Image: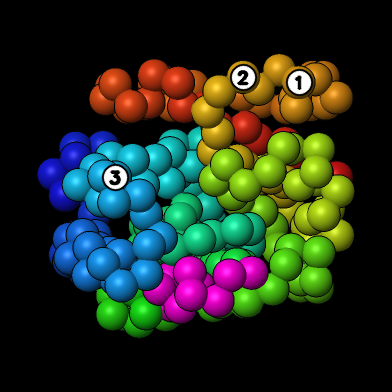
């Protein structure tokens, strides 16, 4: 938990309590339903929670912003972001029922009231949002084809509405089609832990 306070020192007491509760909740649920690699659970705060919060280093979402988390799995990046931005609404989308059950139970246990859950494929989601976020779900061109319909035209944040993805590995093939439109950020610019040396964030405005 200290790693979260290291980079986000202005958390409220409630937020600290919510973040602190995540380890016990995920460890308990992961023993029943495997949503996080067994060897990874010890690194929950760095590899999952802090990684998810990298999106907050790109943009502080304004109150009333709506965000769709595609392929949330056990709730990443949606749940950590929902704790950090209580005035922002999050819809967590996942097609695998047991995974979204874990995310929903953890949101309930941490008293998150700004999160909803849809068990469906992104192709079938009809609502519109300011931003779509995801964590290593699919290549950017494929994601754009599916979620372009879900991004609102009206703007209310410091960056235009669009897609924000957390990724690792070789990104050139998937960002090449977007030329100068896409912004790629090294998470190592924000977080000094070795895990982030190869982690990147992609932002693509969608007009």
Q: Locate residue 44, reporting x and y percent.
A: 27, 48
Say whether residue 13 is left or right of residue 95. left
Q: Distance from label 3 to label 2 (Cα)?
A: 22 Å
Along the viewing direction, whichever of 194 and 150 lies nearer the viewer: 194
- Could you tell whether 3 is left or right of 82 in the image? left
Residue at disc 3, secondary structure: helix
Q: Which mark is residue 173?
A: 1
Q: Nearer the viewer, residue 12 or 113?
A: 113
* Residue at x-position 69% and y-position 73%: 120
Q: Earlier in the sequence, mark 3 or mark 2?
A: 3
- Taking the magenta stretch, the answer to whether it contains residue 24 is no
Given residues 81 and 77, the one toward you in this image is: 77
Q: Residues within 10 Å of mark 1 (few under 14, many from 20)?
A: few
Label 3 crowd (10 A; few <14 / some 14-19 / many >=20)? few
Quadrant containing the C terminus in the rendered view: top right
Residue at 69% from the left image edge and 58% from the top image edge: 130
Closer mark to the observer between disc 3 and disc 2? 3
| Magenta-highlighted residues | 95-104
Query: Distance from label 3 to label 1 (Cα)?
Result: 28 Å
Q: Quadrant of residue 8?
A: top left
Residue 30 percent across, percent down from the top left: 30, 65
Disc 2 target residue? 170
**Decide: marks 3, 1 in contact (CB < 8 A)?**
no
Closer to the chain start, of discs 3 and 1, is: 3
Residue drawn at the location 26% of the way across and 25% of the way down: 193
Give the numbered dot on residue 40.
3
């Amino acid at each position: 938990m200290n790693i979260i306070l290291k980079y986000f020192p202005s958390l409220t007491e409630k937020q600290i309590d919510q973040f602190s509760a995540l380890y016990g909740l995920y460890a308990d649920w992961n023993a029943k339903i495997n949503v996080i690699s067994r060897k990874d659970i010890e690194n929950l705060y760095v590899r999952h929670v802090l990684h998810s919060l990298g999106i907050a280093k790109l943009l502080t979402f304004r109150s009333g912003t709506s965000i769709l988390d595609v392929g949330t799995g056990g709730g990443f990046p949606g749940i950590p972001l929902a704790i950090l931005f209580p005035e922002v609404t999050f819809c967590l989308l996942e097609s695998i029922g047991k995974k979204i059950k874990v995310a929903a139970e953890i949101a309930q246990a941490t008293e998150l009231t700004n999160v909803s859950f849809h068990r469906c494929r992104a192709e079938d989601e009809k609502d519109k949002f300011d931003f779509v976020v995801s964590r290593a779900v699919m290549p950017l061109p494929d994601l754009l084809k599916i979620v372009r319909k879900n991004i609102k035209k009206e703007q209310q944040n410091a960056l235009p509405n669009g897609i924000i993805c957390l990724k690792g590995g070789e990104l050139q093939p998937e960002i090449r089609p977007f030329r100068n439109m896409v912004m790629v950020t090294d998470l190592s610019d924000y977080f000094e832990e070795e895990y982030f040396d190869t982690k990147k964030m992609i932002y693509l405005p969608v007009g």
